[in-house]
Image (cartoon, grey):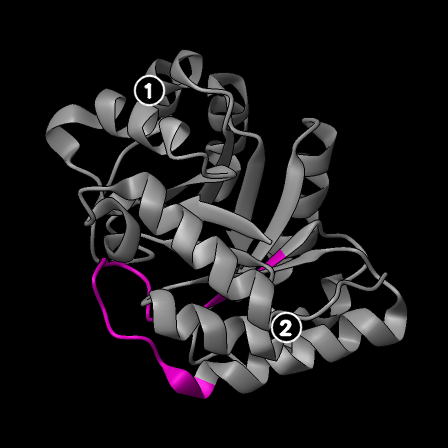
Amino acid sequence: MIIAPSLLAANFGCLAKETMRADRARADWLHLDIMDGHFVPNISFGPEAVRVLRPLTRLKFDVHLMCSRPEILLIPFAEAGADHIIVHVELGDRVTPLLWKIRSLGKKVGLAINPPTAISNVQPYLEQIDQLLIMTVNPGFGGQPFISEMLPKIQQACSWRRERNLGWGIEVDGGINFNTAIDCAKAGADIFVSGTALFGKRQLKKAVEKIRRLVKTHGHKREG
């Protein structure tokens, strides 16, 4: 079970301190939402932020490109220090070359799917990925409520993973708090991205420990 605080919910006035706070809290990864103002109606940060934060922690940087033209960003983020790079299935014909390019850069390969998109769209790529990110809110803004209708998507992904004996992780992002994390763990998720419910707490370490304990108690045993 992997806990990944989302930097989108951190204090943007002191991202370095917030990154070190996540490190001290013994999170597993740091999730970075990259928004271009086009694919989603918001702008966050770019490769330079990743480059500056990279020396501060050994946490894996889980970089989620919510961008219309991720192909121009893969090398900059890889060189800046991303460990995983996630692109969206909604990009259609461009997905396969994007996944191949991420792999060629020596990075873990992630594929994300938005709430309105049918889970069947990810099926052609299941042999090519390291993680499947199921968005549990419509991307673009932090602090949104969890969309419970996404739980069957998680269950379906878990079923496919088991049937095909595959080893990728099922990641969830959006409205993940102590209660919704349990629901996602029961459905089969094992990577939990949480912004407000973690960075919003004064004692981040205790919050990380609590969410980890809850999802371990309620989660599936990984197969594959």
Is 181 rendered above or below residue 130?
Answer: below
The N terminus appears in which quarter of the rendering? bottom right
Say which of 28 and 159 sits in front. 28
198 sits left or right of 59 in the view: left
User: Is residue 29 in the magenta section?
Assistant: no
Disc ID at residue 188: 2
Whether the residues at callouts 1 and 2 have beta carbons within 8 Å, the answer is no
Disc ID at residue 151: none
**Magenta highlight range:** 132-149
x and y percentages locating residue 211 in the rendered image: 42, 57
Q: Disc 2 marks which amino acid?
A: Gly
Query: What is the CA distance from the residue labelled 1 to the residue labelled 2?
Result: 35 Å
Q: Secondary structure at mark 2?
A: loop
Q: Disc 1 marks which amino acid?
A: Glu
Q: Quadrant of residue 33?
A: top left
x and y percentages locating residue 77 in the rendered image: 47, 27
Is residue 7 visible in this depiction of the protein? no
Is 131 rendered above or below residue 32?
Answer: below
x and y percentages locating residue 2 in the rendered image: 56, 49
x and y percentages locating residue 16 in the rendered image: 26, 21
Query: According to the image, label 1 marks what residue?
Result: 48
Q: Main secondary structure of the magenta part?
A: loop
Say which of 163 and 113 sits in front. 163
Disc nearest the viewer among 1 and 2: 2
